[in-house]
Image (cartoon, grey):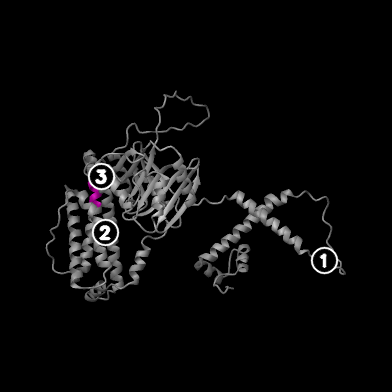
Amino acid sequence: MNSPASHLDPEALLRMVDEPVPDAASAAHLDSCAECRDRLKAFAEVSRDYDRFHQSVLKPSFPPPPKPWEPLVLSPTRPARMLPTRWLLAAAAIAVLVIAVRLLEHPVPVRAAVLLRKAVAAERVARPSHGRIQIRAGSRLLDRDAQVPRGPESAGAAALHTLFDSAGYPWDNPLSAEAFSNWRANVAEVHDEVEETGGVYVLRTGARQGPLSDATLSLRASDLHAFACKLRFRSGGEIIYMSEIPVTAPPAPEPNPVPVPGQSQRLEIRPSVPPTAGDELRVVAALHGIGADLGEPVEIERNSATIVVRVGGLEERRRQQIRKALSELDFVMLQIEAASSNDLKPPDSAKAGTAAERSNPLIGGLASQLGGGVSASDLRDQLIDTTDQAAQRAFALRALARRFPPDVTPQLSPADTATLKGILLDHVDVLIRSTREIRRMIAPILPAPGSTVGPSEANWQAAAARLPAAIDRFDRALNGATDSSDARKAQLAEFLADLERLTTTLRSEASQ
């Protein structure tokens, strides 16, 4: 059945269009061959297009028959001859009609590169923007001119400027198609997706290399004007949001609407004051209560009117849990994206596969010292799992430190401060248990404990900010070891001691 190129032949694929259940061999081949799946999908689409054309265009165009068909009897002495030329012309005409119907029903997708070129050209002929934009990254919020302002920068602007530079993204007029195009041109491998909905083009570019994992630009379809942008960092998942600040005149007072009998009225509730840091903490606490602050695709953004919670993907059961957890908070706007097949894949499968393929002499030697039937692979898996648990808590603690920096925590009420400390203690206690378990497992290869004195952090936020890097450094030294030398073991002990010192500092700060 397979062709010499190891693909299913066209005849077999056409049979599968009419008979959707293939034989076992063909089904197994389709599971492993993306090219054959694509070809089968293309054949099925053409078949559906022709059927739609036949039912909706061709048949209605025929006049009703003047009389019933007479039986078709072929003369035995004069065999019927088919005219290939006429049949070929008819088939060609039908093919042209099918293509025309398909083009009308399915417009040609917009290519990202073409769309960006047109948007950049439109920006260059338009008047220079004198509006203002808002840039937000975590707890940092900046309102500024669309074009880069002249003169010295404030401390907040300088911090965001540094963040843009680290991402390789232009700081001068960043909310523009030209800035997006310049960044995209400097990325080695990109994958683009373009959607058009409600008069808006949404262009998402994923980058396989570089500081940013992806960037999303929103353009008005009418004039290709950029009005929103989102940048997502590869390390730590930090996100930068950019949006236009609309220039509007104060609204005129509106008369009280007169209810129309029988017409349902929609009540829109707007907070009288902007949401506070305490309100944001209540959102964090609600998500923490269901464990939705441990690496799931949940983003929290506080603006001048509301607190937006964006949930990317996740299965329906989990989305319902998040809806229920936030249902009592009337200042929250919940935005949930539909789950895709990629969203539902198990996390970290690539990391686990890579770890399983290589041997680790450090862990191999440790398994030999432990004895008792403990295999190196089982020990490696236990250490990876425990390190991952610690990393989850480290990233959650760093997110809290960024959301509630030292200049924000004094704004919290005593009750909110107690709530924040409770969340801190939950994460820190799990982190301490994980580090203790790691020390217990690798104790036989650690040298004698030395001094654990290190640089002191000014506050818990500073200690939390260092945690992910400390976890990553220890993880690389342990789970990525290529030797089992005494120097490697001493380095491992040093990194573990530094991690334990940071967790002790956090525990002490959160308990005060």
As measured in the structure, the alpha-carbon distance from the residue carrying label 2 to the one carrying label 1 is 82 Å
| Mark before the other along the chain sequence, 2 or 3 | 2
Q: Position of residue 296 (x, y in %)?
A: 36, 53
Q: Which residue shows up at 28% across the image and 72% down it? A: 360
Question: Who is closer to the viewer here, 256 or 128?
Answer: 128
**Residue that numbered label 1 is attached to:** 80
Q: For the residue marked with disc 1, what is the amino acid?
A: Ala
Q: Is residue 358 above or below residue 47?
A: below
**Tags 2 and 1 touching, CB below 8 Å:** no
Residue bounds of the magenta highlight: 421-426
Callout 1 secondary element? loop
Q: Which residue shows up at 13% across the image and 66% down it? A: 449
Q: For the residue marked with disc 2, what is the amino acid?
A: Ala
Categorize mark 2 by other alpha carbons within 10 Å: few (<14), some (14-19), many (20+). Answer: many
Q: Is residue 272 above or below residue 44?
A: above
Q: Is residue 47 above or below residue 282?
A: below
Disc assigned to residue 390: 2
Majority secondary structure of the magenta segment? Answer: helix
| Residue closest to the far right | 77
**Residue that numbered label 3 is attached to:** 404
Front label number (2 vs 3): 3
Question: Who is closer to the viewer here, 475 or 224?
Answer: 224
